[in-house]
Image (cartoon, rainbow, N blue to C red):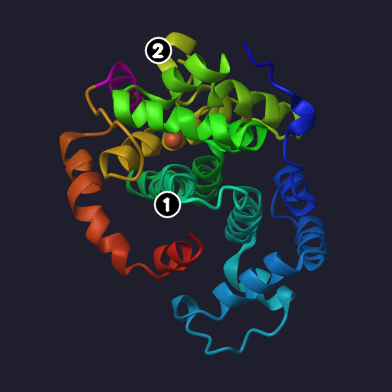
């Protein structure tokens, strides 16, 4: 059995660990945010690009990061920073299957987590947190890929061919899975709650007995439910809405049959028209 070597973990971009530790949207955080972003060219370019996109109809008039942050708001900028930084840690997997089953799946999960929150009346901060949670939920797969890319490809193939879950295939080949790796990474990077439980326990809620208060774990539930929906929409592997986990999440989030129909049938064509979604797709 292979041991998980935490020394081999990718380094979390400074801008991302910084921003996930920044507290609320008070004045200090705003200037801290600006300083953090300034230090990273890729991230600053992306924030300016979004602020000047048709989404905000400013016709290229946003010239400074300060203006962009004021326009987009703290939490959205935070989501964008995580998106840009995640892209850079995901960049190692420049092969088709990784792009499809890890990177694209993560982006879609992020967008869905926010959309589920929106539909179920979560406040905007929670919606943005859920977006970040969705992006990071499978970060353990990035760790496994960095650990041993050949073996990770084998695990993905095994999962796809044998119709077993990624977790089972990873367990077979690595002796540990992407949730264990994700949890270890989040601890090493010192990321705050709820990212630890999102990365560490999104796949098997029943077994992990995550059953706490809904308000307390709202972000976690949104990200975990979005993971299911994302797979069901074909962005991932082996979705099952009738699994025990999906049932737990639907009851926690109060998902009705109508909500489910909305997420599976009405939302996807709407998303394809969404400027932010289109922007995210350009990143894949
Ligand atoms: Fe996962
Ligand atoms: Fe996932």
Residue that badge 2 annotates: 206
**In what element is the residue under mark 1?**
helix
Q: Is residue 136 left or right of residue 70?
A: left
- The structure residue drawn at horizontal position 62% and vertical position 61%, both measured from the top left corner, is 77
Q: Is residue 107 visible?
A: yes
Residue under numbered circle 1:
111
Q: Position of residue 210 (x, y in %)?
A: 48, 16
Q: Would residue 247 be counted in the magenta stretch? A: yes
Span shown in magenta: 243-250
What residue do we see at 61% from left, 29% from top? 182
Q: 277 or 76, which lies in front? A: 277
Q: Position of residue 129 (x, y in %)?
A: 55, 44
Labels in figure, total: 2
Compared to residue 179, the image places residue 274 above or below, namely below
For this view, does 61 lie left or right of residue 267? right
Point out the quarter of the image occupied by ligand 2.
top left
């Amino acid at each position: 059995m292979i041991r998980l070597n935490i020394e081999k973990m990718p380094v979390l971009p400074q801008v991302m660990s910084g921003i996930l530790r920044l507290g609320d949207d008070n004045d200090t955080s705003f200037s801290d945010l600006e300083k953090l972003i300034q230090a990273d060219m890729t991230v600053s370019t992306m924030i300016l690009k979004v602020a000047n996109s048709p989404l905000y109809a400013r016709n290229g008039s946003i010239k400074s990061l300060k203006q962009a942050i004021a326009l987009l708001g703290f939490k959205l900028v935070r989501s964008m920073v995580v998106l840009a930084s995640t892209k850079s840690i995901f960049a190692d997997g420049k092969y088709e299957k990784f792009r499809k089953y890890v990177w694209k799946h993560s982006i879609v999960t992020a967008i869905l987590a926010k959309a589920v929150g929106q539909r179920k009346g979560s406040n905007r901060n929670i919606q943005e947190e859920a977006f970040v949670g969705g992006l990071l939920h499978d970060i353990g797969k990035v760790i496994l890929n960095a650990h041993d890319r050949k073996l990770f490809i084998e695990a993905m193939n095994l999962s796809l061919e044998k119709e077993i879950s990624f977790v089972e295939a990873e367990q077979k080949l690595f002796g540990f899975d992407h949730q264990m790796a994700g949890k270890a990474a989040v601890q090493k990077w010192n990321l705050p709650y709820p990212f630890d439980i999102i990365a560490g326990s999104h796949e098997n809620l029943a077994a992990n007995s995550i059953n706490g208060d809904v308000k307390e774990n709202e972000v976690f539930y949104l990200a975990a439910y979005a993971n299911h929906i994302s797979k069901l929409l074909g962005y991932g592997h082996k979705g099952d809405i009738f699994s025990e986990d999906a049932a737990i999440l639907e009851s926690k989030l109060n998902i009705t049959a109508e909500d489910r129909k909305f997420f599976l049938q009405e939302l996807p064509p709407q998303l394809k028209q969404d400027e932010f979604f289109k922007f995210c797709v350009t990143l894949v």
